């Protein structure tokens, strides 16, 4: 009988960060890997992965906590940087990298894999210079430990800071007066390709240190915004001017994007320097990986944004006992929501679910059915389905069913009903009924398309106050009345 392949022990630092979380999810699905994560707080990890990983609580700024974390580790991923810290993050980055390299050498770790940023020291911003310095520190003792140093420019993926800036600016501003740095060149790369490179590095058959630059086509930031607009079906005008300083640009970004000032300032400073590939090692050592084009990565990010945040959510896991929508790990500012919470006060959750499943058709939409009908008429006149499509059968739903101008997108029995709007709206909309043991959480989700999408959302907010508050309360009231009727009936 052949021996089974030896298992490879992996440590991921920064496992609750943007890159680390995605890498962790990828690696736990691979055979012959034992995945351990180093985190400051184990409670930031999602319940879905807890039984698939080892957890070591610690901090790279506390060397004593690294001993247990690095025990028997073969490959250690270093995905840490301190940008946004109130302290001197450059010094923190130096200390962290020194501590980690020394601890890896002492523990006999074979390889460190680090993800840094593209750029050259002579022209790099403070932030990029710190990332370069971190790579140099981790690579300092090649005779004792090997370092694979990946360098990436703008990373495009749902929830990444770069994509959120581009998406928000393109969607919100039909015309932009832009600073000179929009003419700066970079080579963006999709998050899926970043994860592919990091994963492939585990089994890379080399023994010396390597610096591997990754990226797709060379584009200016102006070209990136124009191409993103094309993917979103929008047209945008951009007029570069020389008067916008990095500080002014930072304030401009925080007005229209979810990125906070400190991070915006560092990103803008970095955008003044070209971040292009300096070597061809990605193609030489990973010929099997062909990075997706920039447009493909934008399209994928938008698709993931819609599906991961609404259609495929944390409540899909039946193993998670508490499914609170406010605790879902989401990208900031990605979607607009109207949330209504109604206590069940002893009303059985299954009856509330039945009540939600009875909406539409002949039953209608409770007190403000007339407003729903008016909206349906407007939809009809604009070429949509309208409300008179009705439903397949009263009280029963299955995925794909039509309910007036909604379509059933997801059903979790006695737990969740998600409706996708097929009405004509400047964006995409969902209506979700999340039934907790003691609470109904009704959420209207809206992913706006451009400025008109946002204007539409805020224009109908006054109607939401009446329609959605009435809907959530009446759903629970109907379930409560049904419960009273059933319990009042004598048992046979």
Image: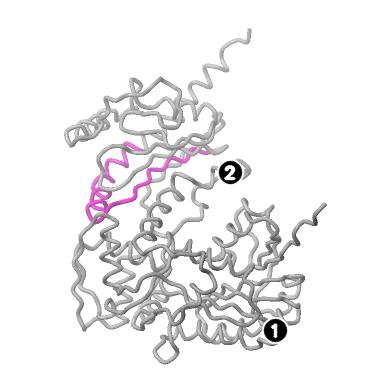
Q: Residue furthest bottom?
A: 122
Q: Residue at x 54, y 42 (%)?
A: 316
- CA gap, disc 1 to disc 2? 40 Å
Quadrant position of residue 341: top left
For label 1, count other residues whose C-alpha is less than 10 Å away and answer few (under 14), some (14-19) or many (20+): some
Q: Is residue 148 above or below residue 440?
A: below
Please tell me whether residue 457 belongs to the stretch shown in magenta.
yes
Please tell me whether residue 94 belongs to the stretch shown in magenta.
no
In the drawing, does residue 250 fall left or right of residue 55? Answer: left
Q: Residue 91: x, y in percent?
A: 55, 87
Q: Residue at x 59, y 45 (%)?
A: 322
In the drawing, does residue 44 fall left or right of residue 106? Answer: left
Q: Is residue 300 above or below residue 190?
A: above
Residue ID for mark 1: 102
Q: Main secondary structure of the magenta part?
A: helix
Q: Residue 51: x, y in percent?
A: 69, 52
Q: Residue 169: x, y in percent?
A: 29, 65
* Residue range highlighted in magenta: 439-468
Q: Residue 158: x, y in percent?
A: 42, 59
Q: Residue at x 62, y 52 (%)?
A: 47
Q: Nearer the viewer, residue 145 or 397?
A: 145
Quick one: quadrant of the C terminus? Answer: top right
**Which of the labelled discs sits on residue 317, or is there none?**
2
Sequence-wise, which precedes: disc 1 or disc 2?
1
């Amino acid at each position: 009988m052949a021996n089974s392949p030896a298992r490879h022990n992996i440590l991921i630092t920064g496992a609750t960060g943007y890159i680390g979380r995605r890498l962790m999810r990828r690696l736990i699905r691979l055979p012959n890997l034992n995945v351990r994560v180093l985190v400051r707080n184990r409670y930031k990890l999602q319940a879905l992965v807890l039984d698939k990983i080892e957890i070591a609580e610690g901090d790279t700024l506390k060397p004593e906590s690294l001993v247990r974390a690095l025990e028997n580790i073969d490959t250690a991923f270093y995905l840490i940087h301190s940008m946004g810290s109130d302290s001197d993050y450059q010094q923190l980055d130096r200390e962290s990298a020194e501590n980690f390299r020394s601890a890896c050498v002492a523990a006999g770790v074979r390889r460190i894999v680090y993800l840094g940023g593209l750029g050259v020291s002579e022209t790099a911003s403070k932030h990029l210079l710190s990332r370069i310095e971190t790579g140099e520190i981790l690579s300092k003792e090649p005779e004792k430990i090997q370092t694979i140093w990946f360098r990436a420019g703008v990373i495009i993926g749902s929830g990444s800071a770069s994509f959120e800036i581009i998406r928000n600016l393109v969607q919100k501003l039909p015309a932009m007066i832009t600073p000179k740095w929009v003419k700066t060149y970079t080579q963006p790369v999709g998050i899926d390709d970043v994860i592919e490179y990091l994963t492939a590095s585990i089994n890379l058959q080399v023994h010396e240190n390597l610096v591997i630059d990754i990226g797709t086509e060379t584009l200016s930031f102006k070209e990136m915004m124009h191409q993103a607009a094309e993917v979103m079906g929008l047209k945008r005008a951009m007029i570069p001017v020389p008067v916008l300083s990095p500080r002014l640009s930072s304030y401009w970004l925080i007005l229209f994007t979810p990125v906070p000032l400190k991070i915006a300032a560092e990103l803008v400073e970095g955008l003044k320097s070209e971040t292009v590939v300096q070597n061809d090692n990605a193609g030489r050592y990973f010929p099997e990986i062909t990075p997706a084009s920039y447009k493909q990565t934008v399209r994928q990010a938008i698709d993931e944004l819609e599906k991961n945040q609404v259609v495929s959510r944390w409540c899909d896991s039946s193993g998670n006992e508490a499914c609170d929508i406010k605790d879902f790990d989401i990208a900031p500012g990605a979607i607009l929501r109207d949330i209504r919470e109604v206590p069940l006060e002893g009303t059985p959750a299954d009856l509330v679910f039945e009540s939600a499943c009875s909406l539409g058709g002949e039953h209608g939409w409770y007190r403000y059915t007339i407003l729903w009908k008016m909206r349906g008429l407007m939809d009809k006149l604009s070429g949509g389905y309208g409300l008179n499509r009705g439903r397949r059968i009263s009280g029963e739903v299955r995925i794909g069913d039509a309910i007036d101008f909604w379509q059933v997108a997801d059903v979790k029995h006695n737990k969740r009903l998600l409706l996708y709007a097929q009405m004509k709206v400047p964006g995409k909309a969902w209506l979700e009924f999340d039934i907790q043991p003691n609470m109904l959480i009704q959420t209207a989700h809206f992913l706006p398309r451009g400025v008109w999408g946002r204007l539409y959302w805020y224009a109908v907010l006054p109607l939401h106050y009446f329609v959605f508050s009435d809907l959530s309360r009446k759903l629970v009231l109907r379930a409560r009345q049904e419960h009273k009727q059933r319990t009042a009936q004598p048992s046979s």
